[in-house]
Image (spheres, rainbow, N blue to C red):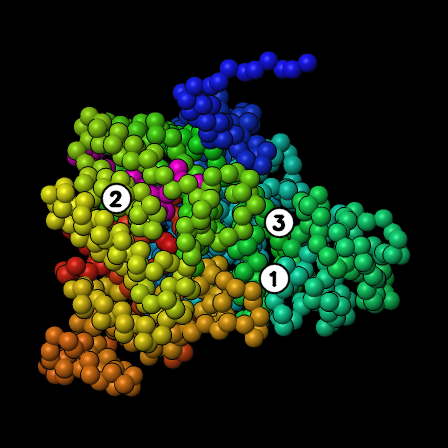
């Protein structure tokens, strides 16, 4: 029997169906993740809510608390604002019924400050704050900063180097048996063996040095809720091993897991395979670098495989298997037998496979294996397809579960609409906290970034999937600022996030998004599967500035101009209503060499954006300019590249008052290039692509000097370089010359990047090695609003303030508007 025909749906009906489907996606976590609202609140929610989270016993007594359930220790001053990590985490836990206390910037010389709130009933949460403590304390030249934007009065020196380690160690001294949970940008980007620029060596995971029980990486609300409620239910923290977005130590790989050799995934050619960590004989290696093993040990010791036909918990596509030679001693412990497969894990078994990365001991001594491990780590960063990772550290296994599932729009709204006071804690009185001053009128509308810039670790921290707030939630926050925040004059200083214009941009298909393993959605070109429609963002801008009492809405977050040119109407809106004379964008480099290592678009894209911006500014009757930012001494940059950039700056009338050079922050892809001299954007081989790395002190100074070609102190250095490069024709006193042939009296004695030896808080004076890079800075601030969103912010790139001249001439100076923005870690 023929089914009756269905009536044709109207266009309005179809649009409604699409909108309903989108709303369902916005409200339903991917991957079957538990909604943040899906937990029964802890019993303490019946108590009086805290007007501000307590920092003393007296405040606890006023609330009627005998103890805190969770105590957060942070390197920042406590500001109850959603731009500060401890505020979001504390208010989020409070919304789940937990009693939360804050220990902000404790004196780490003894345990007294760590004991001020007593013993928590559940755990201590430890974070360095919104920035990596080393980036916060030291300039790119490794000089100690005189100030700290996250401290009252901007006072420097109020947090220790490697704060997570120091705070955790003090807590262990005071409370030996209380669980320690690490989080924030510092812990997140140091969760595996990582290159540490300040010591110029590979350090082991921060979990071992801090002696933490659990590390939560990235935006940690899902993991935090799960861990807190399970601890409250009486589950030991040592048994919490299945939560996404967590890292922890274990003795060995448990039963039922299929180990995949990471070199099998990358097929790195002549990179030597790493040895089986369970081998009892020193130096024993796996039979094949393209091997995949199956093991069935329990936590107390390995079990012996008896034959080829034994029952195996996982299957593989290629059934050709053989028993590898038995390794081990004939002592009390039975020998370990490695079952070797050649082939790939079936999709059905993927969830029970773990990727074996090279051990800490291997990557510490082998830069190529370090680059390979970095490539694998970045490849396994998509929550839709990432697998667990394991890395041997001595006699322990460092286990990383897959990344957390992104928050839905409803969950983001709930998080940012918690009852923040939007002010510093009352104990600070009238003290000025610079970071707060710069973000108190700004609003986060999104998290995450899919740009994939190699010098930035934001994808590894916040993820590349954009997590959006609803339009209604953002508008309500604007009204809250207007009605409650003292000193508001009607100007919203920023509507943005890690990037200004990725709001509501996403893959056109959830299925494609979940399967994608590209490191960037916009390089080498904008992905055809990416929705680049800026209409939702334009609509938000218009509604924001139409609110009563709102005079202007500025956009201070960095604009991705390669995305903006896909939506000319967005550029029109930006130029006409949201730019205050100067718009800062970041080409970063001019030449293909460094651009390809940064994964940034070419200058042709910049010129297309500039043409649109200039045209729409003129239509709006405004005289406005683009301020391009560039980075010096990035891997892949030659002296000739910097000379080309200097000539471009001169031809276009730019004079940088500050410069910023590449800072190798933990976990960034460019850091792997810096350390290894290889390119992890391609399959890593010992005979693979080599990357030029400006490491020598003299070369680093030269690259910074090219960016400040107009500074007379740099002219002697530039003249020598131009003669060596065969470009003496650029020395002279005419307009076509880069530097003059004369030297003004009293100049030339302090060339760019000159620095003194530096001292860290955990070492004796370390003389500046001639091969160590004096990481300078090139004028640039992708995100001008102060801090990282959530528990930590973005990944690191520090600014250098040592070359300020007070006035910029169409340069990348951060002082436009009369106030210098506090650093935001990139």
Q: Is residue 234 or residue 204 the one in the foreground?
A: 204
Quadrant where the N terminus is found in the figure: top right
| Residue segment shown in magenta | 486-506
Q: In the rendered structure, are the residues bearing label 2 and label 1 in contact, judged by CB atoms less than 8 Å apart?
A: no
- N-terminal of the two: label 2 or label 1? 1
Q: Secondary structure beneath disc 3?
A: loop
Q: Is residue 666 left or right of residue 478?
A: right
* Pointer 3 residue: 387
Query: Does the segment drawn in magenta span residue 496?
Result: yes
**Location of residue 233 by image quarter:** top right
Disc 3 vs disc 2: which is toward the camera?
2
Judged by its main secondary structure, the magenta piece is loop
Distance from disc 3 to disc 1, alpha carbons, whole Å, reads 14 Å
Q: Residue at x 12, y 49 (%)?
A: 623
Report if residue 799 is visible in the image.
no
**Taking 201 as reference, is 568 left or right?**
left
- Closer to the N terminus: mark 3 or mark 2? 3
Closer to the chain start, of discs 3 and 1, is: 1
Q: Are marks 3 and 2 in contact (CB under 8 Å)?
A: no
Tell me the residue that label 2 is attached to. Answer: 571
Is residue 276 or residue 145 the one in the foreground? Answer: 276
Regarding residue 3, the answer to whether it shows in the image is yes
Q: Which residue is mark 1?
A: 266
Query: Around disc 3, counting alpha carbons within 10 Å, would you say few (fewer than 14), some (14 to 19), or many (20 or more)?
Result: many
Is disc 2 placed on a helix, strand or loop? helix
- Closer to viewer: mark 2 or mark 1: 2
Q: Is residue 709 magenta?
A: no
Residue 720, position in %: x, y?
25, 85
């Amino acid at each position: 029997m023929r089914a009756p025909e269905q009536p044709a749906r109207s266009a309005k009906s179809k649009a409604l169906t699409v909108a309903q489907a989108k709303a369902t996606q916005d409200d339903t976590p991917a991957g079957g993740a538990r909604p943040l609202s899906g937990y029964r609140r802890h019993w303490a929610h019946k108590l009086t809510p805290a007007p501000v989270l307590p920092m003393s016993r007296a405040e606890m007594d006023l609330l009627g608390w005998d103890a805190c359930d969770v105590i957060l220790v942070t390197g920042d001053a406590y500001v109850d604002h959603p731009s500060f990590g401890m505020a979001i985490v504390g208010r989020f836990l409070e919304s789940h019924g937990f009693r939360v206390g804050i220990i902000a910037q404790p004196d780490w010389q003894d345990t007294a400050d760590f004991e001020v709130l007593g013993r928590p009933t559940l755990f201590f949460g430890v974070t360095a704050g919104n920035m990596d403590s080393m980036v916060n304390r030291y300039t790119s030249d490794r000089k100690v900063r005189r100030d700290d934007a996250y401290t009252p009065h901007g006072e420097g020196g109020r947090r220790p180097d490697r704060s997570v380690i120091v705070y955790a160690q003090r807590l262990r001294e005071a409370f030996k048996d209380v669980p320690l949970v690490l989080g924030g940008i510092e812990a997140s980007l140091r969760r595996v063996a990582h290159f540490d620029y300040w010591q110029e060596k590979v350090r082991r995971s921060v979990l071992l040095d801090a002696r933490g029980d659990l590390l939560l990486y990235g935006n940690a609300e899902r993991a935090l809720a799960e861990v807190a409620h399970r601890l409250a239910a009486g589950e030991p923290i040592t048994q919490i091993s299945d939560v996404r977005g967590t890292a922890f130590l274990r003795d060995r790989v448990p039963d039922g897991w299929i180990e995949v050799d990471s070199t099998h995934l990358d097929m790195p050619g002549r990179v030597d395979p790493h040895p089986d960590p369970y081998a009892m004989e020193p130096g024993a290696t796996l039979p094949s670098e393209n091997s995949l093993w199956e093991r069935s040990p329990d936590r107390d010791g390995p079990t012996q495989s008896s034959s080829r036909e034994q029952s195996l918990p996982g299957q593989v596509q290629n059934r050709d298997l053989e028993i590898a030679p038995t390794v081990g001693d004939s002592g009390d412990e039975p020998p370990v037998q490695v079952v070797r497969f050649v082939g790939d894990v079936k999709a059905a078994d993927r969830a029970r496979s773990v990727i074996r990365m090279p051990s800490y001991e291997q990557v510490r001594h082998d830069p190529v294996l370090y680059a390979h491990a970095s490539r694998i780590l970045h490849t396994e960063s998509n929550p839709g397809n990432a697998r667990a990772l394991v890395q041997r550290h001595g006699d322990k296994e460092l286990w990383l579960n897959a990344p957390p599932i992104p928050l839905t729009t409803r969950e983001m709204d709930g998080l940012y609409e918690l009852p923040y006071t939007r002010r510093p804690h009352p104990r600070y009185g009238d003290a000025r906290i610079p970071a707060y001053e710069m973000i108190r009128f700004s609003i986060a509308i999104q998290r995450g970034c899919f740009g994939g810039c190699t010098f930035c670790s934001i994808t590894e921290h916040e993820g590349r999937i954009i997590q959006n707030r609803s339009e209604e939630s953002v508008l309500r926050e604007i009204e809250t600022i207007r009605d409650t925040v003292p000193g508001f004059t009607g100007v919203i200083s920023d509507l943005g996030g890690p990037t200004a214009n990725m709001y509501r941009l996403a893959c056109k298909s959830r299925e494609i998004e979940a399967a994608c393993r590209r490191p960037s959605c916009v390089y080498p070109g904008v992905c055809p599967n990416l929705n680049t429609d800026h209409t939702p963002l334009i609509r938000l801008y218009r509604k924001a500035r139409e609110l009563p009492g709102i005079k202007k809405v500025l956009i201070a977050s960095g604009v991705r101009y390669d995305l903006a040119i896909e939506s000319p109407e967005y550029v029109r809106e930006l130029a006409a209503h949201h730019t205050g004379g100067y718009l800062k964008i970041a080409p970063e480099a001019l030449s293909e060499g460094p651009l390809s290592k940064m994964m940034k678009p070419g200058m042709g894209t910049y010129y297309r954006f500039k043409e649109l911006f200039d045209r729409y500014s003129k239509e709006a009757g405004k005289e406005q300019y683009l301020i391009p930012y560039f980075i010096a001494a990035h891997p892949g940059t030659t002296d000739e590249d910097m000379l080309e950039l200097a000539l471009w700056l001169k031809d276009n009338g730019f004079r940088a008052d500050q410069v910023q050079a590449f800072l190798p922050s933990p976990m960034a892809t460019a850091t792997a290039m810096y350390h290894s001299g290889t390119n992890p954007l391609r399959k890593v081989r010992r005979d693979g692509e080599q990357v030029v790395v400006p490491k020598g002190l003299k070369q680093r100074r030269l690259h910074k000097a090219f960016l400040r070609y107009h500074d007379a102190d740099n002219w002697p250095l530039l003249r020598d370089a131009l003669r060596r490069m065969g470009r003496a024709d650029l020395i002279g006193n005419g307009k076509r010359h880069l530097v003059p042939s004369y030297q003004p009296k009293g100049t030339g004695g302090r060339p760019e990047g000159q620095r003194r030896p530096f001292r860290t808080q955990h070492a004796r004076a370390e003389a500046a090695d001639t091969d160590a890079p004096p990481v300078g800075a090139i004028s640039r601030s992708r995100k001008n609003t102060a801090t990282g969103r959530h528990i930590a912010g973005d990944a690191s790139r520090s600014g250098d303030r040592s070359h300020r001249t007070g006035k910029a001439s169409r340069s990348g100076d951060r002082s436009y508007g009369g106030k210098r923005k506090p650093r935001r870690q990139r």
